[in-house]
Image (spheres, helix red, strand yellow):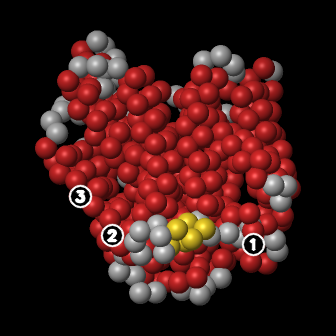
Amino acid sequence: MNRNDRSIVGLVMVAHAMVHTYELSVPILVTIWLDQFGVTAGTMGLVVATGYALFGIGALPGGLLADAYGSRKLIIACLAGMGGSFALLSLAPSVPVVALALVLWGVAASVYHPSGLALISKGVSQQGTAFAYHGMAGNLGIALGPLATAVLLLFFDWRIVVALLAVPAALAVAFALTVEFDETANVEQSATDGGDSRADGGVSSLSEFLADSKVLFSGAFVLVFVIVMCSGLYYRGVLTFLPEMLANQPLFDPVPLGGRDIEPSQYIYAGLLMIGIGGQYVGGMLTDRIRVERGLTGAFGVLAVIALLYLPALNAGLVALLAASAALGFALFVVQPLYQAAVAEYTPAGTRGLSYGFTYLGVFGVGAAGAGIAGFVLELYSPTALFVVLCGFAVVATVFGAILSTRTTA
């Protein structure tokens, strides 16, 4: 990569890692908030789901803002907003303030994916390498965010931990303000070569937005969109309360150390997410070796089976639980590069940016309902019922993957 590529990749790697660090630190904190504020799982699930929903809902306007004002400004605003929201969270005296802080985080974080991906597509010449590094950084944030939060909680009160998590955002803003790059370098090259300077798929008017959206949802993309919504519901539904479910197992009773209690369940959760890095890698490799439709069908079928087997494994001892958690973490992230490749395959190049905007709306916006659904199912029924619901999400995605595969071979 040239100097401009490296500067852009450095910025998006930092920002992507931080978005997911904050995103996945929240479930660790949920276990503390349930005791701290004396609320039910259903109430806390609704609070968390609201912030996560805005994380997805803001993707579409975020993409339009990135086209209008440039990706750098949006990324800086994202980093500053996330840091500020966690600073507010550290001072939250009640659940409504926690909800406000998470809403602000969701709004700020929502603009990252469309602006970061647009920046790569418009400014980087070696896009394949850039997307690879970008994805790896995001997965490191997914894995290390909960781990860092759990480790800090060994030594500090949760409010101090949240305040410390806000500090890297300030450092990232300083970096973003000083790093130099041309965010349209690749667009200019494409135009010179006779390519389409509208390669980011941006829209310039409401009528164009509606027309492009109609084109997308009149084709096979509508099947892909159902699959990504199910993926988001499963992802958010299983991860939001998994630390709490693990903590309730006698196998993971707190261990006293140095005057504080170590929560083994939090490290199992962090390890599950760390294994997801391998799942992302394998999923990416599969996109080059098999048809993505078959990959999606098979991967979601595996997730359906894991949902049915996870709870029995949870009660079958440490070895079974570790094996089931490893399988869950791996399979949960295998599907992501597969559906990303499916979006690229089943959308016109001129609407690719809009396509990914709708994709993140489905994964993070609609998918955020998974947290609320999980909270209320746990409150009204049992963990068994929750995993049956999760299995249902995976089965729907499997069916639509099979329909998509049949459609393309017909």
> Residue at image x 66%, y 77%?
41
Residue 186 vs 204, above or below: the answer is: above
Q: Quadrant of residue 377?
A: bottom right
Gap in angstroms between the C-alphas marked 2 and 1: 30 Å
Horizontal relation, residue 53 to residue 199: left or right: right
Mark 1 surroundings: few (<14), some (14-19) or many (≥20) residues within 10 A:
many
Looking at the image, which is closer to me, 311 or 378?
311
**Are the residues at dot 3 and dot 1 in contact (C-beta closer than 8 Å)?**
no
Q: Residue at x 63, y 54 (%)?
A: 268
Residue type at mark 2 is: Ala
Q: Residue furthest front?
A: 258
**Mark closest to the chain's N terminus, 2 or 1:** 2
**Is residue 360 visible to the viewer in this orientation of the structure?**
yes
Badge 3 or badge 2: first in the primary sequence: 2
- Using the rendered image of the protein, determine whether residue 60 is visible from the camera's viewpoint: no
Across and down, in percent, residue 184 comes to 24, 30
**Residue 13 falls left or right of residue 369:** left
Which residue is the extreme one toward the top?
193
Q: Is label 3 or label 2 in front?
A: 2
Residue in the picture at 80% in, 48% down: 320
Alpha carbon separation for disc pair 3 and 2: 11 Å
Locate the C terminus and report the quarter of the image it occupies. top right
Circle 3/circle 2 CB separation < 8 Å: no
Which secondary structure, mark 2? Answer: helix
Label 3: which residue? Answer: 170
Three-letter residue code for mark 1: Leu
Which label belongs to residue 131?
Answer: none
- Contact flag, marks 2 and 1 (Cβ < 8 Å): no
Residue 323 place in picture, x, y as percent = 75, 44
Question: Which residue is the site of mark 1?
Answer: 378
Residue tagged 2:
163
